[in-house]
Image (cartoon, grey):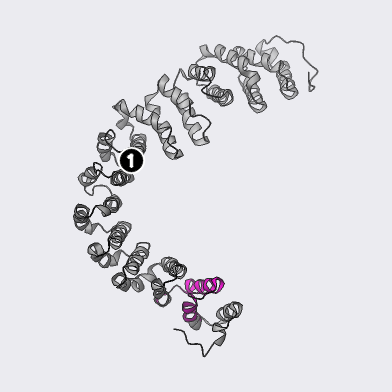
Amino acid sequence: MYQSAPYPELFDPDPAVRTACLERLDAGDAVEAAATLLADPDAGVRETAAQILLACGTEEAARLTVRHITSDNITVRNRAGELLAQMGEAAVAALVPYVDDEDHDVRKFAIDVLALLPARHVAHHIARRLDDEDANVRVAAVDALCALEADEYAGALKDLYEREPVTRPSVVAAFGAFGPGRDLGFLERALSDEDPVVQFAAAEALASWGVPDVFPTLLGKVDTLDPMARPLVLKALVELWERHPDLAESLPAALKTYLIEMLDDPDDTYAAAAARGLHVFLDDETVDALLHHTGRNDTLDLEIFRALVHYPASFMCIVRAVESGRVNVVPATQLVLGLLAQQALAPELLGHVGRFFQHQFHNLDVETKLAALTLYRNLQHPALHPLLYAALADDDPEVTTYAADLARETAPASGFPLPDLPAPGTAR
């Protein structure tokens, strides 16, 4: 405990006085004083003390800080842990003795912090706690060995997996962290565990490897996986065949069904992965399912559009979706505009496209109408004249003015028959 005699202001009843005194101490005295005041009742004083300890960041500062991880005050204990984690390697030696503390909560806390540090060289201290009398400490030890990638303890972790079901998700995660080639058979068995949490951990571990060797294992388990784990496996499969296209040459039809179901996943990451995966299963059914999810978010919309670009019949699928009311006309029209801009529609379809625009033009917002007219200007294709006719008859002056200007501009080259137009730059 820091002695009060040299600096009685450190124990003044006024927190502002304690803070001011702490801030003007020289470096040597400040660190020791700060370690004491890290448990001060005032939050401002504690934070000033914390910043002094962190700025020092030496093994001595860590040694003075670490005693607070035994505090009954959770705020003080957690702040001490944060500081030690931020101090990095300097804090490792100070924490090691607490791995064997008589209090199981302190043991767990020390292990948790070591897992955040470059503490690979003290993994043997942590590994001893795989046999701790407290289950939470045992799990913390597994998690720490995982974080430190201490794969020399793989055998001990396997033994723990067999005798301690509560540790299984953490053990499986550790094997994932140990990297490709570390007992694929063990993780394959974990994929069949009756506990869906263990299945999920195994799927996540194998997915993290990202190597083609795991593809047959993941593919073979899709049908039997718990629904909670299946999206993760599907996402991993999609990412693997994106990196290694030859893997997608022979895929079971059931994958298409699972990916269509995954479009409904509330996690946008999984929904987007499903849309990407469906690129290799393109048919009317797939495109209809993709269109049903337009407008959810920009990332998913982009993946849907990329699929449509590669499917020749996508335009007719869009028309059916609009006519059946499954897709709003505005996002559907924006998709058609994108397909036109990418030259992804066959020339023989352009007449149908022109009539689609003409029929739906009055249902569009002004921004989409103007975008359609701009694309008409760029393409100047006779099959799209119905779009311009619809725009000239629109109720919005901004649209009709732009359309009239386009009619004058494009008529000589396109052969568009000029109707009775308003004066340039004026509304009808």
Q: Is residue 364 left or right of residue 50?
A: right
- Whether residue 277 appears in this view of the structure is no
Is residue 52 highlighted in magenta? yes
Residue 60 falls left or right of residue 402: left
Q: Give the residues in magenta.
A: 30-59
* Residue 169 screen position, x and y as percent: 29, 50
Where does residue 24 sit, x and y in percent of width and height?
A: 58, 81
**Viewer-proximal residue, 294 or 101?**
101
User: As drawn, is 341 to the left or to the right of 217?
Assistant: right
Q: Quadrant of residue 126?
A: bottom left
Q: Is residue 103 magenta?
A: no
Quadrant (top left, top right, bottom left, bottom right) of the C terminus: top right
Q: Is residue 27 visible?
A: yes
Indicate the quadrant containing the N terminus: top left, top right, bottom left or bottom right: bottom left
Mainly helix, strand or loop, the magenta region?
A: helix
* Residue beneath the point at 35% across and 70% down: 92
Check disc 1: other Cα within 10 Å, few if <14, some if 14-19, many if 20+. many
The count of marks equals: 1
Three-letter code, disc 1: Ala
Estimate the x, y position of residue 115 in percent, counting from the top left.
Answer: 35, 62
| Quadrant in the rendering for residue 322 | top right
Could you tell me which residue is drawn at 78 percent across and 23 percent down?
A: 425
For this view, does 324 lie left or right of residue 91? right
Picture layout, residue 355 above or below residue 37: above
- Secondary structure of the residue carrying tag 1 is loop
Residue 423 placed where, x, y %? 81, 18
Q: Residue at x 43, y 76 (%)?
A: 61
Circle 1 sits on which residue? 229
Above or below 93: residue 338: above
